[in-house]
Amino acid sequence: MLERRSLASKISKVVHSRSLKLGIGSQGRLGRDCLLDQALWHFGSMRNCGVAFVTVISAFLELGSLDDACQLFAQMPNSNAVAWNVMISGHAKRGYEWEAIKLFQNMRNATVHTQATKQGFDSNVYVGHSLINMYAKCQKMEDAKRVFGLFDEKNVVLWNAMLGGYLQNGYASEVMELFFSTRVLGFHPDEFTYTSILSACGCLENLGMGQQLHSYIIKNKLEDNLFVGNALVDMYAKSGALDYARRKFELLENRDNVSWNVIIVGYVQDEKEYEAFKLFERMTSDGITPDEVSLASILSACANLRVLDRGKQVHYLSVKYGLETSLYTGSSLIDMYAKCGAIATVYEVFISMLERSVISANALIDGYAQHNLEKAVYLLHDMLAEEDALRTFDKMKEAHVKPDAMTFLGVLTACSHAGRVFEGCQVYDIMINHYHIEPRPEHCACMIDLLRRWGFIDEAQEFIHELEFEPDAMMWATFFVACRLHGDDIRGQHAAKKLIELEPEKSSPYVLLSHIHAASRN
């Protein structure tokens, strides 16, 4: 009952706010603390009003109450294009991609699609925009491309959605290719188009192209636009032209958080941490309140320099602004305290976080792996399941924390150092068979190290032979150390020869092999 009252109160506030903005309902009739049923009752008199339905559906979706949204949507006497769009985008944002696709298919077969076609296909542009965004978030850019192709006449909204989708998925080259195709078609980019293109240039570190775009921006009189200006600073910083970035930053008028963040991040990434500190202090003295990105960037600088006192000051600021439990700030605090050796504080920060992700989990595991190896192993088991380390998927999905390749690398390293051979093998199996993460050379080297370190030479050799790719120099070097440690000269010679084949220009394999021959003569 308490949970329903809490949800009702939240829904009431959202509905109240939306109704007033849209000019429907009155301040007196829809109290901020009324229950959900009462909130809906006040809309009862407007049940023939499509705007009223869309308002309440939007409120349900915004607060994650999808079942109620679907129920209300089904009651709409005439579902219009706006309602369909709200339902599709609402499901997509909440991670219900297939439901969103089904809704889109139903919409295209519904009367609204016929009406939209009569009015011109542009009435469905925003639905297409939502679908492209959804597919981009699901890393299904081929499907996004297919939706994009359905539109004969594409406007700036659709072009920007595709450009943003490619950028979001790391396809910077495709962003550039698509942009130049728009130029050929006579499409006129807006400020949002240029921000995507400049971000792509920054990712590619293509300073020449970025400067060329800067010229276009000046010709189109968009240089004074704050979004474009911030994107230019970011592009120059990422392309290694920090002086240009700083110059452009100083020319910006009415700087916002993004302006300060991109230049501070640029200095941190360029390992100019003290200049980043100065900019951060200047930002706060100018009256700009730091956000998650600002704090995370400065905490990274503190971690890089191992300056715990300054890190604690930033922690105090994060508490002051209510950001210490947020995802990015919390993860950065964990990383900073771990690198500064304050391992006792690391777990306190982790458990205080309201939202956790694989980034925060990785930071915590890496911190324990550096300072308290046993805890890193136990932590992953706690993440994976309460009783059985193999019952992983449902628990991780529920917690919205899915281990990635770096998570498993940190835990395998911890297992190796702590002598947890069985747990290490189990973790490696979970990585491949439950999370379908392809092992990288680093994972394989960790497994070889785990086996060799604790005397399982035969198993280490078998592991190497069963790899589906050729072992690299790091793996053979790890195996060679195991052979030397356990006095296995025959397999040690084989490992040294493999090292020479892979790195003939390096002298170390030859030295290692000569040591084996000298030891065998003695």
Image (tube, rainbow, N blue to C red):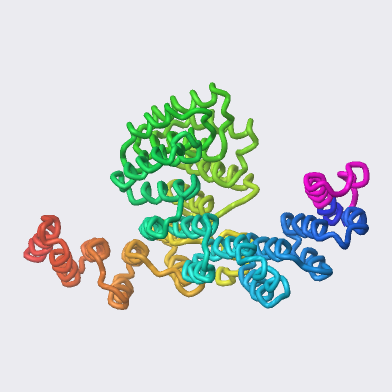
Residue 413 painted magenta: no
Residue range in magenta is 10-35
The front one of 341 and 257 is: 257
Q: Is residue 255 above or below residue 181?
A: above
Q: Position of residue 196 (x, y in %)?
A: 45, 50
- Residue at the (91%, 53%) spot, across then down: 42
Q: Among all residues in the image, which is located at the extreme top?
A: 285
Q: Is residue 460 left or right of residue 24?
A: left
Residue 19 painted magenta: yes
The front one of 491 and 478 is: 478
The front one of 462 and 69 is: 69
Q: Is residue 88 above or below residue 15?
A: below
Q: Quadrant of residue 243?
A: top left
Looking at the rendering, in which quadrant would you find the C terminus? bottom left
Residue 9 appears in the picture as rendered: yes
- Residue at the (93%, 46%) spot, across then down: 29
Q: Quadrant of residue 462?
A: bottom left
Q: Position of residue 460 (x, y in %)?
A: 31, 71
Q: Position of residue 86 (x, y in %)?
A: 70, 61
Residue 386 appears in the picture as rendered: no
- Residue at the (13%, 56%) spot, across then down: 506
Q: Position of residue 301 (x, y in %)?
A: 43, 35
The front one of 316 and 60 is: 60
Looking at the rendering, in which quadrant would you find the N terminus? bottom right
Q: Is residue 333 left or right of residue 238?
A: right
Q: Is residue 312 left or right of residue 46?
A: left
